[in-house]
Amino acid sequence: MSIYKQPPAETGAIITWCPGCGNFGILQAFKLAINELGIDPYKVAVVTGIGCHGKLANYLAYNTIHTIHGRVAPMITAIKLANKELTVIGFAGDGDQYGIGMGHLPHIVRRNPDVTLIVHNNTVFGLTTGQASPTAEKGQKTRTTPWGQWEEPINPIAMMIALGASFVARGFAGDVQHLKWIIKEAIKHKGFSFIDVLQPCVTFDRLHTYAWYRQRIYKLEEAGHDPTSWEEAMRKAYEWGDKIPIGIFYRVEKPTMEELLEPVKKNPPLAYMEHKGKPIKDLMEEKLSYTE
Amino acid sequence: MASKNTIQILVGGPAGSGNITAGLVLARALHREGYHVIGVSEYPSLIRGGHTAYWVRAGVEEVYELEDKTDYVVAFDQDTIDKHGWEFTEETILVYDTKTVSKPPSHTRNIPFPFREVLREYKLKPITMNMLAVGVVSALMGIPLDIVKWSIRKQFIGKEQVVQDNVKSMLIGYEKASTMKQEYEPPRLGEPPHRPPRILLTGNEAISTGFVAGGLQFYVAYPMTPASPILHYMVSVMKAKDIPVIQAESEIAAAQMALAATWAGIRAATGTSGGGFALMNETLSEAGMFELPLFIVVAMRHAPSTGLATHNGQGDMLYSIFAGHGEFPRIVAAPADQEDAYYRTIELLNLGWKYRVPVILLEDKHLAESTRSVKAFREDVRVESPALIPRMEAEKKISEGWEYKPYAETENCVPPWVPPGTRGALVKAESSEHDERGIYTEDSAKVSRIFKRRMCKEERIRRDLEKNYEVLRTYGVEKGSEDLVVLTWGSAGWAVREAMKHLEKRGINTRMIQLIYLWPFPRNKFLEAVGSLGGRPLLTVEYNYRGQLGMLVKMQTGLEITSHIGKYDGRPFRGRILADKILEAIKR
């Protein structure tokens, strides 16, 4: 067995993912997508959560926040509010987003900020050494399910379509070109875009290997899927097992947070405005019983 | 007619009866006349029914807190008599609803009033019943009619029909009282002392107004009593003042949004009470690691747990100072009153962006929701963010060769921040330990160096606060001539100042120290203020059980507290009752 040398990232940080980790494919696809879209790197803001995926923040020469566990969604919402000029991308893990951070998903959908959320879905908690995540399949053996998982898994795609997300897609970390295309479409989409990425964990998930996925996946766009149909999207979302669809399940145009919140809509990016106070004489008169 | 220095009014009734509105209208009218005014509410955690009470105390002299005797009582229910009867005297004038009050006390000066019959007789809107009472009390107290009308107009601003309906009822009440035959003279206040401009407001309104004057650019919160009125206020000014507001899905989300927006380079804040603050703790620690000025208003209420959701408490002082895992610098300030709350809000917004540290504005329910007449606020306040380099300026520096590092070692321990989106700057915030660029590291030397640099802000902030900010206030007699020193903070200071009036009459010289900046604890300024005690008692008065300020003082200075006078039933002290407790404590 040859000795694995951890590669450096463009920031100088050493990439500490396991050799063959699905995260490499996601990292590569994302950087290619930003490059091909011609977005200036300094105008990109990335938020990552806690877990193996979270290290991505250190490997990207973009502005980043590596936040606490499960809280990527509220952060990317607020960054877009504060600076609508930035391209804002969140990366979360399956434990991060569908476990501890689940409660934020309906609300980012309701607000519909023009941001993208990419969930690295590898069915386990990798960095804490292989416990079952909310997407572990029934019967899947992990450190915390030695006799096979007894809980039902979450279906992220069906859930996000049901919530009314305006862009819902699934990618595969083993197909960088296809994932890059999805990410580009997601960034170009006006409003909240969501991508669940099937990401083999080569160390802790013996079931969902690259080969396992490759035998099963097929591309929705090659199968004549109509992503504007909610019913069609929902039907495809429940397809799992021998055939697993990847691609864009659903997309629809809705007004964004930046259009709906008047102070954000009518002003330049708040982050570029001078810190200065506003008059309060009118408030004292209207609200505070000002006496002359 | 003998005029009084202060007058206290109580309007009690079931929730939804409008008694709090009646109290507010009277408070505002007295404020308009030029008196010192405070208004205090007590209400249960429900929407309809139950018993609510609103006290107004007005004075020719400054009034800080309620007293144990009430001059005018309006009772819309029997509970007003049963629960608050202890504050009635032979001179108390009691206006009560003949339909709902079956057992009025016999020792008070009673005015039975058939509110419902009068409503019917004059075809008044039932909802304006409370204004009949306002009319009666205003007439007895001799408040000019145009001033009462002004107050009603302010209460229902922008709703002309509602104003007219309420004024109509008030006038009937006013007329009825003016024609009543009296065997006694109703108490009235002496000449009002004030020159305008003045305002009447709660602590929450002061903080919200401070946010506007202090250049806040985003407010985000999850509803929680008693912090919710800040959210309501900020929403009400969102369009006029161009400040976006989001109601978050949880306090965790609220804190995360405020922190992320701060990262983006704007002034953002959130507000909550103890339970919500608990949910924000992980983010507070994260802000400590990011070195970003997450701004949290902690509006304390009675705790632990859900506690008394609508009542007062000061149990979260030490919690605010030490909340969040790990060690990191922060600033905690507890404004002294409604006027102070405005200026401290602006000060904290500035301090956060001066040192790049999280800041906590700590208020209690009594300050948050009690109203007070104060001098109108100055608008010429300083708004400055020394640690933030605006984008254009940063881009110029970078083009001239500056290498931007968000966690650089600097002479003053504070690395400058630039808004992400600045060309040439890589702006990284890493919740793990990191190097100067914000890249994760486990290297022992690097971790030690950055940890030390982060912590070194604490001592610098302490020195800056002591030198350049009003970290505490002292009241009472000259240092050295006191019989005792009382330490207090937040709204507990109001009752102490009222108690001091009583103690003075009994020949006791008191000196009171009101702490405002609690962390970093202003050790030197504090010890200087206390001076040489020479065996004289050092008391704490706080709305908690343990005497948390005393614990903090002992920890920071080694000074022993003689005795703690605490209150933990959710209600404020009354001046004379506190004076008795202080006397008892110093006799021991």
Image (spheres, helix red, strand yellow):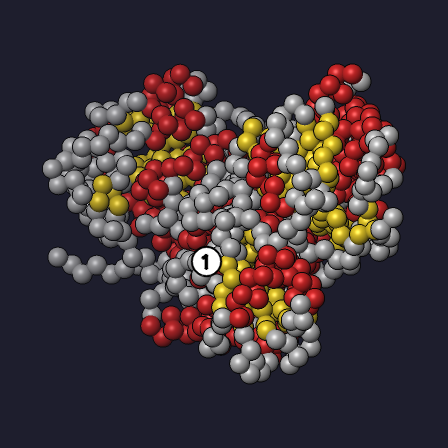
Q: Using residue B530 as the reference point, say whether residue B555 is left or right of it.
A: left
Number of numbered callouts drawn:
1
Q: Where does residue A18 sit, x and y in percent of width and height?
A: 24, 53
* Residue on which the image places disc 1: B545
Which residue is more in the foreground, B37 or A166?
Answer: B37
Q: State whether residue A255 is above or below residue B313.
A: above
Residue drawn 60% across the image and 45% down it: B86
Q: State whether residue B524 is above or below residue B173.
A: below
Residue type, label 1: Tyr
Residue B377 figure quarter: bottom right
Residue drawn 85% across the image and 41% down it: B142
Residue B41 figure quarter: top right
Q: State whether residue B281 is above or below residue A112.
A: below
Chain ID of residue with mark 1: B
Q: Where does residue B217 sit, x and y in percent of width and height?
A: 64, 48
Element carrying mark 1: loop
Residue drawn 59% across the image and 80% down it: B531
- Is residue A289 at least partly visible in the picture? yes
Which residue is more in the foreground, B381 or B115?
Answer: B115
Q: Where does residue B479 sit, x and y in percent of width and height?
A: 66, 79
Which residue is more in the foreground, B62 or B149?
Answer: B62
Residue drawn 58% across the image and 34% down it: B79
How many neighbours does mark 1 have within 10 angstroms: few (below 14), some (14-19), or many (20 or more)?
A: some
Q: Where does residue B12 sit, x and y in percent of width and height?
A: 64, 36
- Is residue A41 at least partly visible in the picture? no
Q: State whether residue B527 is above or below residue B220.
A: below
